[in-house]
Amino acid sequence: MIEHPVDSDSDTPADVAIAGEGTATPIGVKLGSNRTTIVFREDGARETVQALSCLTVPDNPAASDTRVHYGETAARRFPERTVYVLQSGLPADATSGRQTEQFFDALCTEYDLPADSAVVYAIPSVPDECGLANLSTVVDRSAVGEALTRGFPESLCGSIPALGDGVEAIDQIFVALNLGATTFEACAYRHGDRQAPFSTDDATGRSVDWAIVDAVEDETDGAVTLDRETAREYKETHADFDSYEPFSDTVEHPDGGTHEFTVEHGVMGPLDAYLDDVVDALDTGFFSRLANRHLKTYQLALTRPLVVTGGMACVPGLADELAARLGERLGRDVTVVTPDRPDTAAAEGAYRIAERLVADD
């Protein structure tokens, strides 16, 4: 039986119970601000699916055609009517909650996920009680999870694929860093107990996107103004700390014609600043908190690799560059480990927890 305190810093593990007789289907979920990931089994094979966390909103709710489109289809076919349901990373209010429910139900329906399932979902370590409650409500009200719905810290879920083939992370001591779109999170884990959780929105993937917008505009002397989605695509396609190469693109002018431009520093400059912000947050925020509250864990964790997950960790070379800069700041060698897919690791880890819960029942 996996045990883990998901609601506090307490050193006393919270029991996880599951209904049924071990026949429930395990499902792992990460509802993200940019993309949502679900991991499940179909015909004996493990499946991982991702979709943009968005859906269409009808122009006229009273119209006869109120069909909901979501994900890439919504963003591509109906951009003017598409909303991202988790702009802040959590359902912020009743409207966002309803839209997130619609989106999640549509996703579960498309992949025919069974109602008789044990759903484990990743939850961010942020001090937003209302948003976390809304997230729980979204999953609890969905058509899946009749056997169990349970949230576990996102940084723990994401660390599980990085530290073994099963759920070995539950029994280890380590520090996990989640480089997300809307928050940067750091947390220590000691045999499954969460210690000194830290989060900030001062260093996020979304802030990098907006910084790329500004940097490209400056680099082109105001001739090019990107939207955030294009800036994010630049980051995901071209950013590389190992071997970045400048690239060219074209934009259409409103009065006709096109303008070709080259991005020299407009992508990597914001990423350099982002890593400096992450190192500052770790040095002056998280590690000082961990040392003051849990000195022994702090001493042990620094002798082991940091686990780095989240969408920003997909940028080639970023995790190693973070280790180098943090090591220079702390005056000691720092190593990192990342899962094969940092962007889907939280859902994969959640799936493994669900799988273990079903097996242990």
Image (tube, rainbow, N blue to C red):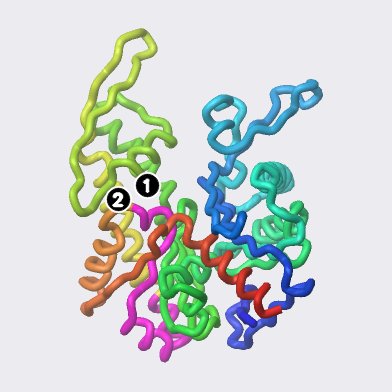
Span of residues in magenta = 287-314
Amino acid type at mark 2: Leu
Q: Mark 2 points at which residue?
A: 271
Residue 155 belongs to magenta span: no
- The local secondary structure at tag 2 comes to helix
The mark nearer the N terminus, 1 or 2, is: 1
Classed neighbour count for the residue bearing mark 1: other residues with Cα under 10 Å, few (<14), some (14–19), many (≥20): many
257 lies above or below 195: above
296 lies above or below 39: below
Residue 203 in percent (x, y) is at 40, 56
Q: Name the residue under label 1.
A: 208
Residue 305 belongs to magenta span: yes
Look at 43% across and 71% down and name the residue there.
176
Amino acid type at mark 1: Val
- The local secondary structure at tag 1 comes to helix
Tags 1 and 2 touching, CB below 8 Å: yes
Tell me where residue 22 sits by quadrant: bottom right
279 lies above or below 43: below
Out of 142 and 33, give the one closest to the viewer. Answer: 142
Mark 1 to mark 2 CA distance (whole Å): 7 Å
Look at 61% across and 70% down and name the residue there.
355
